[in-house]
Image (spheres, rainbow, N blue to C red):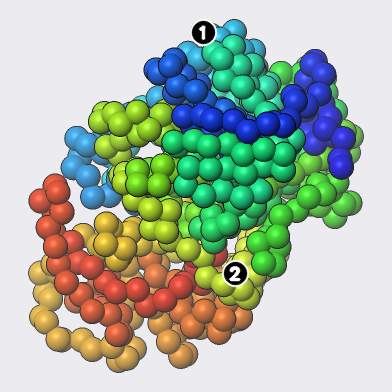
Amino acid sequence: MQPLRTLSLWMDQLDEPLCARPALREDLAADVCIIGAGYTGLWTAYYLKRQAPHLNIAVIDANIAGFGASGRNGGWLMGNLLGEDRLLATLSPQQRRASIDLLHGNPDEVHGVLQREGIDCDYRKGGVLYCAARYPEQERSLRAYLDDLYRQGMTEDDYHWLRPEQLENQLRVSNAFGAIYSPHTATIQPAKLVRGLARAVEALGVPIFENTPAIDWQPGEVRTPLARIRCQWMVPAVEGYAASLPPLGKHQLPVQSLLIATEPLPESTWEQIGLSQGQAFSESSRQVTYGQRTADNRLVFGARGGYRFGGRLRENFNLDAHEIELRRYLFSELFPQLKHVRITHSWGGNLGMARRFRPHMLCDRQRGIALAGGYGGEGVGATNLGGRTLAALILNQHNELTAQPWVLDNRPVSSLASWPPEPCRWLGYNAIIQSFIHEDRTLANPASAPWRRRLASPLRTSWKASCTDFPFPDTGPTGHEHYPVQEHPQRRPGAFKPGRGAAWRTRSGDVGHLRGAQRWRRNRHLGMHPRALAAADRATGVLPFHQGPLHFHPRRWRAPGHRSRRRIDATGQQHRHLGHPGDRAQDLRTHLLIR
């Protein structure tokens, strides 16, 4: 087994012995059994015990607290949730704003707990900089993303544009075109947070049993190698390790993200770079980069990792030379002065991606199961929201937390969307990764011919779709996709029929369900090589389909074979339901972050 201090820079920096707590060796009865001593499990235990001190709660973990992504992530404590735009789309403007404020309050909520419990995890709320650099296409796609945010109800206090000279006051990157700044993000030392939270939970009277894996679970009982736990409620808080608890594995796709850390840099170097207020930063290519300046003046920098056939977990995160040098190349493109800096730490971790990239907080009251997950790399802040929400659901509270669209109350685990079987996932993932690599190499090369840049350009797909969220249809209560009905003034029913080959687009400009030769135009429209998704198309038999109303020019179009109906939701808004055409290749666009 890999030595615990080599799991990440964060674990190596701890000034405490990394000795495992005693394992559970005898049967136990509890009101709540939490499987997993990471962020989700510990936050749930913390809020449950504070609100209901009489509850008998037990936490078990297969390794030690913080062994998984909670002790390995990039330290971004974000005030948002993956896919929040789709989740909030059906709410009224007032409800949407209230939900946005709830999400934006995550960093401050965590900070309040840190102060109350005396946990020092190098918390700095300096905001986040989403930079456009290296090539001009990034600026245009990033500005389009900012426009989308404003249409969703965000304000300039939430996100605003920084011109290059304004960006220089915070961060100096090579060949910058500007950036989006948001104040709703903090940076932390992740291992200090999870280890401090474990001590706070123990101080409340909650025992934590380490080296105690759950080898079987069913309603009312969890079995470990040496004992059984009988309980009224179970909370499987395993995220990227969902495959260890069937059937959760079919609802969570395990992917990896990889990071490196430099040696401590002198103050003179940081004067050239910036980040004096603890800002997080990324650049907006599809390489999906993210970084922060640590409290001891290192640069921590990460980028997407990989996916293993069959959803197998990666156990060994000793990065090879290629994985390290790829990340060195990416940050040296932004900071040329760091091209030859020494890399002292490299590591990675497994994270969980929910189907359609929609985080969930679910409560099955009949079977006594409560779970939260699918954070998709944005879990440092979202796990706090998940813990608070699960505590409220278990205590049968009805408040702002339990009224959110990502909450599935009184729903079985089987109601979560499942990923398609192999080889669809592996083929689609690798096809898309190769298209991203081709795109970045082409656009980053000033000598690329204009036609190559147009072919590889990401301008027609939003930056958010490839880096933070994904353009997939939202899912309504019935499991069908729905789109707000916006009648076109020139629409005549039946004016267009499938298969006539007319050009069309979605509201954001992305193409939808095409067939035959139109795949080539679709791939060019998405900024990909025409053959990039051929394997995924053949494997799944379907093509990307973007969220939002579909518009012909000048009339609405409906995909072939779709049967539609309309309904009125709770807010009085009319929606169109479209039957599933099958699993989509673009479901495999994973941004592979552990932020």
Near mark 1 (Cα within 10 A), the count class, few <14, some 14-19 or many ≥20, is few
In the image, residue 491 above or below residue 333 = below
Front in this rendered view, residue 47 or 209: 209
- Which mark is on residue 517? none
- Position of residue 205 in the picture relative to residue 547 (left or right): right
Question: What secondary structure is found at the residue carrying circle 1?
Answer: helix
The count of marks equals 2
Name the amino acid type tagged 1.
Arg
Residue 533 image position (x, y, % from top left): 57, 76
- Position of residue 487 in the picture relative to residue 478 (left or right): left
In the image, residue 587 above or below residue 336 = below
Residue located 62% across and 55% down the image: 243
Residue placed under numbered mark 2 in the picture: 425
Front in this rendered view, residue 116 or 344: 116
In the image, residue 306 above or below residue 296 = below
Residue placed under numbered mark 1 in the picture: 116
Residue located 35% across and 28% down the image: 395
Residue 282 visible in image: no
Name the amino acid type tagged 2.
Arg
- Position of residue 347 in the picture relative to residue 101 (left or right): right
Front in this rendered view, residue 291 or 329: 291
Q: The C terminus is located in which quarter?
A: top right
Residue 216 image position (x, y, % from top left): 61, 50
Question: What secondary structure is found at the residue carrying circle 2?
Answer: helix
**Residue lying furthest front:** 27
The picture quadrant where one finds residue 511 is bottom left
Residue 504 image position (x, y, % from top left): 32, 76
Q: The N terminus is located in which quarter?
A: top right
Residue located 25% across and 31% down the image: 398
